[in-house]
Image: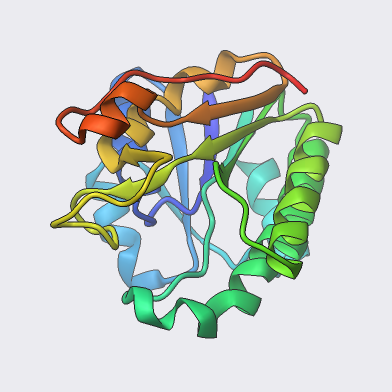
Amino acid sequence: MRIFLAGASGVIGIRLLPLLVEQGHAVAAMTRTAGKAERLRALGGEPVVCDVFDADRLTEAVNLFGSDAVIHQLTDLPAQADELAAYADRNDRIRSEGTRNLIAAARAASAESFVAQSIAWRPEGARGAVIEEHERLVLEAGGVVARYGRLYGPETYYEDELPPPPRIHVDDAALWTVPLLAHKPGIVTIAESEAAAGEGEQRGSERRDGPR
């Protein structure tokens, strides 16, 4: 399969890329930062430097790769958790305008599969509404919404402690994303089992919600 991975240099994308390559897929690894291209190439991807808000360039890139599937792992988040509030509008734009642009590009390329990351909890107010709209767009496009628990592990905000549930180790989040390429349209929750979340001692098993 030829897979266009948007957000390939992100905390999940950088782990997902080699997993897809190991399974024999050809992967276009999209990043907006040219300096990250060589790392993506070293992991087996074909680097694509593109901004999701450049709709024409994005559509061209997805089409030129002959994409069978598009995976949306784009976020715009700060390195430090205490800066999250300052980045809220930027991340919301990724989930609104960015999602619409990716869906339009996938349709133009006649991609058969579309998978987009979301979160398994809901912030209050306007940010929650943006997430609901993001998921609606994906579902209306016949895609799969991957609702991840709070990520912990290397390169996350929780490297040395466990976040409150729902949560998932970042390596498991990437691993359990791969089968979603063949999943029927709907919502899938990727989080530790409630037992594991309560004990905080193991990386638990996948929990899935059916299509909605």
Residue shown at 29%/32% (left/top)? 198
Could you tell me residue 73's position as x and y percent?
51, 48
User: What colouring method underlies this structural image?
Assistant: rainbow
Residue that protrudes farthest toward the front in the picture:
198
Can residue 68 be seen by looking at this rendering?
Answer: no
Q: Please, is residue 103 above or below residue 33 in the view?
A: above
Please state which of residues 165 and 67 is positioned toward the viewer in this rendering.
165
Image position of 84 with respect to 45: above or below: below
Residue at 31% x, 52% y is: 163
Q: Position of residue 7 (x, y in %)?
A: 48, 54
Residue 162 vs residue 151, the one in the foreground: 162
Is 54 placed above or below 96 here?
below
How many numbered badges does the structure rendering display? 0
The quadrant where residue 130 appears: bottom right
Judged left or right of residue 150, residue 186 is right
Q: Position of residue 83 (x, y in %)?
A: 41, 82
Q: Within the image, what quadrant is residue 21 found in?
A: top left
Q: Does 157 sit above or below residue 11? A: below
Q: Which residue is pictured at 65% across the width and 45% down the height?
A: 62
**Residue in the picture at 67% in, 68% down:** 92
Would you say residue 65 is visible in this rendering? yes
**Dividing the image into 4 quarters, which one contains the C terminus?**
top right
Q: Where does the image place residue 29, in percent across and percent down from the top left?
A: 44, 48
